[in-house]
Image (cartoon, rainbow, N blue to C red):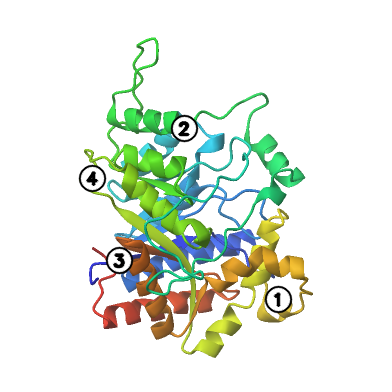
Amino acid sequence: MSDISLGVLDLVPISSGSTAADALRNSIDLAQQAERFGYARYWFAEHHLNPGVAGTSPAVVLALTASATSTIRLGSGAVQLGHRTALSTVEEFGLLDTLHPGRFDLGLGRSGGRPPGQPAAPLPTATPVVDGRTPNGLLIPPRFSFEHLLGSPRIALQRRLLLLPGAESQDYAEQIDDILALLAGTYRSPEGVEAHVVPGEGADVEVWILGSSGGQSAEVAGGNGLRFAANYHVSPATVLEAVEGYRSFFQPSEFLDKPYVSVSADVVVAEDDATARELATGYGPWVRSIRTAEGAIEFPTPQEARAHAWTDEDRALVQDRLDTQFVGSPGRVADQLEQLQEATGADELLITTITHAHTDRVRSYELLAEEWRRRGHSLQQ
């Protein structure tokens, strides 16, 4: 397992008492620190209408970060294709690649477009889960239901503001096909008209598909022979079906001759377990704000988080995320990451850390990098 690399997923969180400008500066600084610590990747997520998140445009933040770093791979985790076109996506990343060739990962996700349908039934997995645990002990919590969000006015508003009036999102699989064709220079319309994107065609970007289940995203990634990133930190209950579904659909391609999987985890590392638990105190209220469709709040201090009056309904909303967050000393968190890698067969791991203070966030990544190397792992492949 010495070749299991670590990457970073950044949401550009805004802490209480700070500004969006502070969050952006901190994220760029953290990317510089992650490069110095030796992390393989630094990805930015895309979020909208969240008061506590400044990461609304991965391409813009990537451009700023690329100019402030030299070697670390940078990427989107993920571009939300539901409210974009294949052309705009290829053009943006083509521009980035023009100035910083060969450094970008184009991570593509389905969010932001068509309203979610009824939740899919859980898919069977080859890995047995008994009493919520895999054979090596990784926690697979009960499946979380998003049904309460289907009629959310905020979700409807986000869709209304992201899409042009009367617009309908393109089918995801078709959109991926168009992106790949535009990058390769092989795009033809149904009428046979060619389209060539400048810059964009021939861009040296690594295409990834991000998914939380074994459904369409896993099928598109596998069927096109693309790299796949599964979200344990967002949907821990479905991580096994996601990675196993992807592998079952995989077809060798010009990009890969065998499946390649990254799995994400939410971690907080400190010198000791008690300090780490204190730093992670704000995570529960923050996740609650997302899952109630209020929009991510500014990340609270531990004192502000403890003032939250929890109800049984609140706790049910966040329990799976709290139970699967890896919090503790470097040794404890590294143990859990190794367990996650073993259970999922991940080729690399992507970690995200949110604390109120930027210095604590930087220190978390530093401590983990030191422990990862001490165990004989390499941060980069």
The image position of residue 262, as x and y in percent, is: 36, 57
Is 101 on the left or on the right of 313, as rendered?
left
Residue type indicated by callout 1: Ala
The percent coordinates of residue 332 (x first, y second) are 42, 83
| Residue at the far top in the pictured view | 191
- The mark closer to the camera, 4 or 1, is 4
Q: Residue at x 69, y 35 (%)?
A: 160
What residue is shown at x 56% (from left), y 30% (from top)?
Answer: 169
| Residue that label 3 marks | 5
User: Badge 1: how crowded within 10 Å, few (<14), some, or many (20+)?
Assistant: some
**Gap in angstroms between the C-alphas marked 4 and 2:** 25 Å
Q: Position of residue 359 (x, y in %)?
A: 51, 78
Closer to the eye: label 4 or 2:
4
Q: Which residue is mark 2?
A: 88
**Along the line of sight, the residue nearer the viewer: 237 or 43:** 237
For label 2, count other residues whose C-alpha is less than 10 Å away and answer few (under 14), some (14-19) or many (20+).
Answer: some
Q: Which residue carries the number 4 mark?
A: 256
